[in-house]
């Protein structure tokens, strides 16, 4: 689309300096991308700055038990007298770290397997049947099983969440590869004497990237939810690391007396997942219009 | 059709065999020693070695897999480390609450999701459509356990309409049984409703732009009949597919919902097993839930011919 001439755009637009028009137009056209990005950025900054912010997530003070929000503790205190605000901010560190790590690792592994399955015909059927089987195993239960056998640590949690996410990426990459493989420019590359690895990396891989970026955000959102669920069930991050899931689990008995101990981390969790999903929807609309129309 | 069903049944056996191999391999390659877990923290290396020998963990992985697979095929899922009770029996004891909760959820979630999806596709762009889609976006973002605590806080603690938690067996009276299932079913169903409503809306939007819908409207067919008979029937296949795939959401959600509402079902069995590191229970429940998921999706595939007579196998 061509630029709208300033003359036809009406008084309001003409009165605004040009460099301000562009960001406003971007926001108006991509509301979910911007909303998701802003919320996520706020949480990311808080998470990164957590060690330097006032408030201590670990100090227990029995005399401060279950204080309602207000005063020295903006979000109140929990059953052990710990600062809920500081714990919510520190909890963002675990959630975001797990979300990003799982997204990157599952996309990397899924991309490698998907490219092989799509490009090297004999490997297709066995790899895809294996992925079908992995997809049939309930993700949360598989993660619980892996974690209960090993030491509880953030690394174990990341690996346990990554494994069940891989098949989704593999299927996506494979479907893109299968449709790209029939394109004339691939035939041209083969005719030109390019070798298979080069064709995969130079000619097929780039077409998978837009869909992968979108998929990575959805995986990130789902990983944050699964991590919180695992922590809530007692199979996640060790209890000495504040995470939203284990905050809620340890406050379960105080729902009636101190609802803020459950609803503050719960709201933070829902907001972050919503933000990442919105970011994914926005990216999908911009990067992958074919998929956007289907949804 | 029968040939197709048999072929699909054969592929189901293959997938379940692969599920078994995946579960077995992942749990055996995980860097933890079941013998050390069983022996406890104060065990001497000699005790651990004795337990390893007893469990057959010193055999090669192939021998172990063969022993495990033949046992599972004959219905023996092993015994609980903690109580020594057979895992199969423990699962059967916990079956009723989980089946009740899942059925109650399906009963409310599928019709309301279809209604929501059809309505917002019909009124696309209106406030009703936007609100329905906003609810569905929130339904995806809100974690099941947070939704559960909000439900308990609002409807049980503040308004005192429904019991806070627990489960009342069906045998003790249908009224009490149902009252205890309302909040858990709403909690468990929210994400499922969101998923199905979105797909229903998207598919209905495609179908509603077809010529035969315009024809039906032009010849004076009632709106309700156009939507429910002409359109929804033709949108059936993708919608039913998602209803099947979404069972995965319900399986994960059952574990969480039963914990929040203190329902003594299969999900609680697993969660209680986590802290005791009772991995035979976890392994057994994974196999049972995976089988349920695979079988439901086979039934969904077979139902395509009923929904759409044009599909022939």
Image (spheres, grey):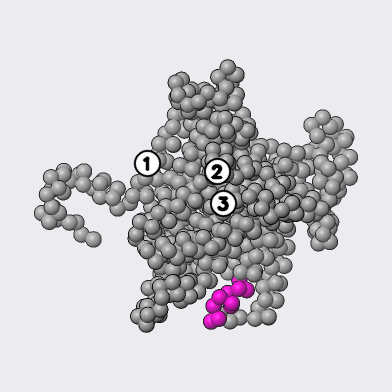
Magenta span has B117? no
Q: Residue at x 46, y 61 (%)?
A: B116
Residue toward you, B63 or B266 = B266
Q: Which residue is mark 3?
A: B186
Pinpoint residue A109: horizontal percent, then vertical percent: 56, 53
Nearer the observer: mark 2 or 1; the answer is: 2
The residues tagged by marks 2 and 3 sit, at their Cα atoms, a distance apart of 12 Å
Seen from the viewer's position, the closer of residues B117 and B168 is B168
Task: Please tell me how crowded label 3 is: few (under 14), some (14-19), or many (20+) other residues with Cα within 10 Å.
Answer: many
Which label was assigned to residue B215? none
- Principal secondary structure, stretch drawn in magenta: helix
Give the magenta range.
Answer: B301-310
Say the numbered circle drawn on residue A38.
1
Which chain is disc 1 placed on?
A
Residue B41 in percent (x, y) is at: 79, 31
Mark 2 vs 3, N-terminal side: 2
Specify the quadrant that holds the N terminus of chain B. bottom right
Asked if disc 2 and disc 3 are in contact, CB closer than 8 Å, the reply is: no
Going 41% across and 49% down the picture, which residue do you hit? A279
Q: Chain of mark 2?
A: B
Can residue B18 be seen from the camera position used here?
no
Calculate the distance from the C-alpha at mark 1 to the C-alpha at mark 3.
Answer: 31 Å
Q: Secondary structure at mark 1?
A: helix
Spatial CA distance of label 2 from label 1 is 33 Å
Residue on which disc 2 sits: B155
């Amino acid at each position: 689309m061509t630029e709208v001439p300033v003359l036809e755009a009406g008084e309001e637009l003409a009165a605004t300096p040009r460099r301000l028009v562009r960001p406003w137009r971007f926001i108006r056209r991509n509301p979910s991308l911007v909303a998701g990005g802003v919320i996520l950025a706020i949480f990311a900054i808080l998470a990164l700055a957590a060690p330097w912010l006032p408030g201590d997530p670990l100090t227990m003070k029995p005399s401060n038990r279950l204080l309602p929000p207000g005063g020295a503790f903006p979000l109140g205190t929990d059953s052990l007298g710990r600062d809920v605000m500081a714990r919510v901010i520190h909890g963002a560190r675990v959630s975001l770290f797990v979300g990003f790590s799982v997204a990157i690792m599952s996309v990397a592994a899924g991309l490698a397997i998907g490219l092989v399955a799509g490009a090297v015909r004999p490997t297709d059927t066995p790899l895809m049947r294996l992925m079908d089987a992995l997809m049939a195993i309930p993700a949360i239960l598989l993660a619980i099983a892996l974690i209960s056998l090993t030491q509880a640590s953030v690394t174990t949690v990341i690996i346990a969440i990554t494994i069940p996410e891989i098949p989704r990426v593999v299927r996506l990459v494979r479907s893109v590869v299968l449709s790209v493989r029939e394109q004339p420019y691939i035939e041209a590359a083969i005719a030109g004497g390019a070798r298979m690895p080069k064709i995969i990396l130079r000619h097929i891989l780039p077409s998978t990237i837009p869909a992968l970026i979108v998929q990575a955000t959805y995986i990130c959102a789902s990983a944050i939810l699964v991590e919180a669920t695992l922590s809530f069930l007692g199979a996640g991050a060790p209890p000495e690391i504040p995470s939203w899931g284990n905050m809620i689990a340890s406050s379960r008995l105080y729902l009636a007396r101190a609802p803020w101990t459950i609803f503050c981390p719960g709201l933070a969790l829902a907001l972050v997942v919503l933000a990442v999903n919105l970011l994914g929807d926005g990216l999908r609309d911009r990067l992958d219009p074919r998929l956007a129309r289907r949804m | 059709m029968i040939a197709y069903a048999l072929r699909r049944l054969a592929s189901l056996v293959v997938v379940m065999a692969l599920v078994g191999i995946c579960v077995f391999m992942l749990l055996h390659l995980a860097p933890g020693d079941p013998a050390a877990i069983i022996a406890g923290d104060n065990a001497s290396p000699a005790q651990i070695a004795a337990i390893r020998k007893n469990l057959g963990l010193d055999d090669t992985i192939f021998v172990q897999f063969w022993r495990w697979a033949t046992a599972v095929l004959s219905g023996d899922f092993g015994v609980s480390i903690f109580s020594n009770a057979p895992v199969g029996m423990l699962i059967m004891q916990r079956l009723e609450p989980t089946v009740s909760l899942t059925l109650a959820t399906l009963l409310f979630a599928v019709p309301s999701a279809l209604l929501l999806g059809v309505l917002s596709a019909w009124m696309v762009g209106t406030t009703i459509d936007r609100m329905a889609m906003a609810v569905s976006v929130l339904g995806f973002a809100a974690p099941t356990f947070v939704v559960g605590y909000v439900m308990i806080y609002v409807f049980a603690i503040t308004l005192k309409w429904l019991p806070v938690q627990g489960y009342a067996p069906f045998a003790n009276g249908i009224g009490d049984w149902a009252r205890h299932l309302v909040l858990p079913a709403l909690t468990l169903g929210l994400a499922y409703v969101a998923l199905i409503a979105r797909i229903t809306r998207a598919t209905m939007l495609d179908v509603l732009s077809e010529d035969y819908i315009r024809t039906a409207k032009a010849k004076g067919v009632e709106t309700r009949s156009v939507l429910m008979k002409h359109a929804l029937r033709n949108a059936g296949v993708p919608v039913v597919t998602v209803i099947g795939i979404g069972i995965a959401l319900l399986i994960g959600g059952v574990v969480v919902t039963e914990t929040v509402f203190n329902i003594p079902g299969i999900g609680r069995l697993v969660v209680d097993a986590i802290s005791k590191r009772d991995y035979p229970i976890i392994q057994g429940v994974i196999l049972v839930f995976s089988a349920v998921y695979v079988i439901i999706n086979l039934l969904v595939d077979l139902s395509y011919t009923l929904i759409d007579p044009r599909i022939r196998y």
